[in-house]
Amino acid sequence: MNCKQKLRLPLISHKTLKVKCPNCQYEVDFDCDKYARNQAIIRCTLGVVSLTFLALYVTLPFVLKPKFDIAHNRIKRNFEDKINIMESSFSDEVRTLTEDYAAQLAAIDIRKLTKKSIEHYARIMEERKSYNRKYALTPREKAQLEMLALASDSTKTLQDIVESVARKAAPTNSEIRANSIESGIVLDIDFDMSELTSGEEGTRTKHKTIDSLRKEVVRLISQVTTDVYEFCRDIDIDKISIGCKHFVNQEYEIGQSRVENQIIYKVSLVHKDIKQIEHNPFLDTYSVSKYFKVEIDEFPNLTIEMELL
């Protein structure tokens, strides 16, 4: 029908109905038997399709599972074979390396190796004694190389060289005096303790006892003396004097006090004692301090006042 009007019709066997649309007045012959046959075919087809899917659903697992198992086993065997080959290869490699290492260890001559080691470290010590630059690791060792270059400068007088080296060796703002006399050069250095260590600003000190303060002062003086001596040892130095200064609160009998930056400890090394110091690029405190002659020692006159919090 042109208007697509839906109609409900009775099915009468062996009859052909004349149907007229009430809307568009279109007439058509409706064969009841033909319609019934078509519906039967549709129902039969749907039933067959449903049964086919049901049969496939039931039978496919039984058909596909053996094939899946076969494929799974084949893949598993392939991987197992590859793993076995890899394990065998790794085992062979480990065995080969083990045998090689064992052969190398067996070939080592302990006596020859010991001899080479002794020669190697002896060569290192000789290079350190010769001030080889590659062994200058700490800032102090690098500074010593700079001072060595100054000491070997032929364009300067002995007095100038000593003063230049002393400025390199001594702490910042040190008072340096070098004087020439008939027997050689007299070098005098006074430095502030606060330039070399923390906690010593002004009249303050980090030390709790005079003995602790004395030990650090001796260590600092030894450090400065060592640097000056090591790089002027070939110069005819008659005497080296090193003093350590610290701010102190000086009290007078009249009841007054005044803060002064004074020398609290000063030592000297004369010509004969300078020559006694063993040749060593990095002398320890004892090697230097055992030859000290004390010129000024104010420690018996010092007291440390503890601040109350």
Image (tube, grey):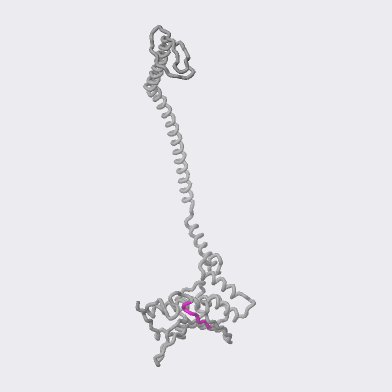
Going by the image, does 122 lie left or right of 298?
A: right
Q: Quadrant of the C terminus?
A: bottom left
Q: Main secondary structure of the magenta part?
A: strand
Closer-to-camera residue (108/238): 238
Image quadrant assignment for residue 216: bottom left
| Residue occupying image coordinates x 40% and y 93% | 254
- Where residue 68 sits, quadrant-wise, is top left
What percent of the width, then of the height, locates residue 139?
A: 51, 69
Pick the residue in front: 141 or 230: 141
Q: Position of residue 206 (x, y in %)?
A: 40, 76
Viewer can see residue 15: yes
Residue 2 horizontal/vertical position (percent): 49, 18
Q: Nearer the viewer, residue 86 or 254?
A: 254
Q: Is residue 170 left or right of residue 56?
A: right
- Residue placed furthest toward the left: 308
Residue at image location 44% in from the left, 10% down from the top: 18
Q: Is residue 16 above or below residue 51?
A: above
Q: Residue furthest bottom?
A: 254
Percent x, y for residue 231? 55, 75
Q: Is residue 23 magenta?
A: no
Q: Which contiguous range is marked in magenta?
A: 188-194
Compared to 151, does 107 lie above or below? above
In the picture, residue 7 is in which quadrant? top left
Q: Is residue 288 visible?
A: no
Q: Residue furthest right?
A: 155
The number of numbered badges drawn on the structure is: 0
Give the residue at x 62% y 80%.
Answer: 157
Q: Is residue 297 above or below residue 66?
A: below
